[in-house]
Image (cartoon, rainbow, N blue to C red):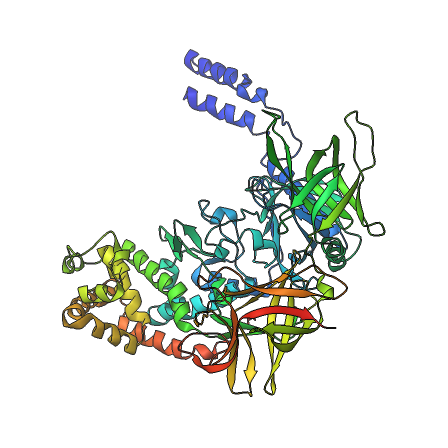
Amino acid sequence: MIPVVASLAVLLSCSKDELSPVSVVIDQTSDPTEFDLWLEENYRAPYNIRFLYRYEDIESDMDYDVAPAYEICSKVLAKVIKYLWLDPYAEVADVDFVRENAPRVMAIIGSGAYSGGTIRLGTAEGGLKITFYVANRLINDGIVTVTYNDPEDESAGYTITVNDVDAINDSYLQTAHHEFGHILNQNKDYPTDFDLISQGDYVAQWTSVGDEEALQMGFITNYASSAASEDFVEVLSHYITLSDEDWESRMETAGEEGSSIIERKLTIVRNYMMDSWDIDIDSLRAVLARRYGELSQVDWTDFSTEE
Amino acid sequence: MTMKKLLCIFCAAAMAAMPVSCVYEIEDVFEQSASQRISAKVSECADLLTSAEHGWLIQYYPGTDRAYGGSTYAARFGANGNVEVAWEKARTVSETQTSHYTVNMSSSVVLTFDTYNDYIHYWSDPDYFSGNDYGGDFEFAYVGGDSRQLEFRGIKTGNRIVFTALETDIVSAIESISDIRRQYYVSYDVNGETLESDGEYNVLYCDVPSEDNPEYYVEASYPFAYSTTGIVFYEPVEIGGVTMQNLVWNSDSEVFVASDAIDGSGASVTVEVKGSQSPDYIAYDDFPGTYEMAYDGGETMQVEITSNGDYSTLNMLMEYGSNTYTFVLGWYPDGHLTMTTQYVGMENDEYYIWFCPYSSDNYLAYAETYGFNLVNNGGQTDAGISLAFEDNGVWSRGTSSISLYRFTSPTTASSATRVSRLLLLEDMETLTKTN
């Protein structure tokens, strides 16, 4: 009784220092551009994803020297990632599935992140954030062509021609599907049977394995031979993004033995996606194939919003 | 009321009356919160950046050792977050690049050029060399300033970066710098000492006695940047007993005059700095004209050289058959031109014609770095310009002849795209201006 009364009195005597209604943390905000509004409508609102296209030091790895992305490259990637990664999953599963499982933050970096002769194309941190590097390759390597309506005045608008869809797959989308596979595996484990198929064939020095050799050993890519968990997401990401033709040609290269191993892995991947996530990867694959076919109809410069 | 209750009330009253820890309230050192103070600093920096009507001249230094010297930009900061940039190294000075900037608080108030700009990020983009070779910054900590001058520090290099408010538009500012740069001086005479340039970066070198042992000489380097009126050294330099930092270009007498030179006693002195071009220098504007190309022990062919106006490349037009082929030659202020593997035009709208280096033992090359240097063959005289063809040293077999080949592609020269030979000019000798 006594201590209660006493402490109440102490508390009361302190309350004269009133809480200021103004937050001490002041956000710096600048007026949103048309692109920012489009990102709000197409990334933040439906999927709860922050798409960071302007370089923010705290969001990038301090161990590397990197350069920001051309705004035009970020705009192309924003459309590509939405159209060929997020929307297909939303179409086959639903929006909630993507919102619950996709990383919260996507960051775009213009240059590569180099160390000791290797370059990073993407990184995923604990399923919360995915970083896409080498965005400026889109322009610098001619993957897309930007044509300005008025060469003297860039503000007069431009058009984008996509020259090389394979390069977009290799540099950005494989990374996205690959990392997304990891996130799904982290949320729901895949069956350990998968690990047994190529047990003993995984190698730390995966770069020493050639692509053809990897296929014949039953790995869809040489990187798949680095660990079972990588193998799993490589099978998933390549199966859904490769065309029938490309997949078949890889199976041919793999030969009877290699292709039968890959098919066994694919069966486990297929069942896992169905049992754990209620996603039919053949439907997903068909949706992606259709969307790849429709890519020429995408208006790369239209960032209008409904509001 | 029992004693016990009384005791309780007494205790409670006593506790309540006790001015526990609250009276020792810590006085705020600052009137405003840390967040308010830093956001005021952010606004100050952003307001100053946008306040300059014509923009700012930026003397930028990449690299912690400033071995690449300074590089001058002129930039106009818009309130909408866009920044329009002109640059002394731009191929076409009048062409500006626009990108985005942000002023925000991280470890301090930081100006970040946060979307890619071909000019600004030239010194910090690792994609050129698979590593950030120049070690440049694109994030700058705000130190302070006023409406005339701002000071920043490179986040990685710590280099001082000075912004000076412009009185002309950004392109005119860079044009005034070009006028000074285009003297193409490679050495400077300062009070009897000679400062030399490597011709590529804005750094001057001078051999000075070592501090440890004055009998030995060591190379001192003096990084500088151009201003609209002359040259500013990164820090005051002492040369020949005089300390100075700012040199003003006098276009009438064609010398730089130090505006802040003081001698050992601190007295102001007048110092003139006279620049010299390479002994082999040939002015870019002197090149356009008709030339005779000599080859194969007495054969000649007439070609035309025209200006691109960029003080970087010239076009060499060669007529053959009913077609004109255009070679792009690199111009260098040390008096040489370069001619390397390149697509030169179409033959009758049918084939893509490439210039391919050709060796004395009849090998053909496609590598874009192979080819000739055309070196000054006797200085620029009244008789005109005479250049000698020399192999540029990149191809182990050596380039000795000009060959033109038909290809099926204007972008890829390889044995897969090669069709047949159009022309071979063997054993190239000289290129001489005839009018």
- The percent coordinates of residue B281 (x first, y second) are 69, 57
Compared with B266, A123 (above or below) is below
Name the residue: 51% across, 67% down: A139
Count of labels shown? 0
Name the residue: 76% across, 47% down: B230
Residue closest to the far top: B3
Do we see residue A95 in this rendering?
Answer: no
Compared with A202, B225 (above or below) is above
Compared with B121, B370 (above or below) is below
Compared with A179, A24 (above or below) is above
| Left or right relative to B354: residue A271 | left
Which is more toward the observer, A79 or B375? B375
Residue closest to the far front: B297
Name the residue: 41% across, 73% down: A165
Which is more toward the observer, B360 or A26? B360
- The percent coordinates of residue B74 (x first, y second) are 70, 54
Which is more toward the observer, A69 or B174? B174
Q: Quadrant of the N terminus of chain A?
A: top left
| Left or right relative to A179: residue B290 | right
- The percent coordinates of residue A305 (x first, y second) are 55, 70
- The percent coordinates of residue A89 (x first, y second) are 35, 68
Do we see residue B158 in this rendering?
Answer: yes
Asked where in the image residue A301 lies, by quadrant, the reply is: bottom right
Q: Quadrant of the C terminus of chain A?
A: bottom right
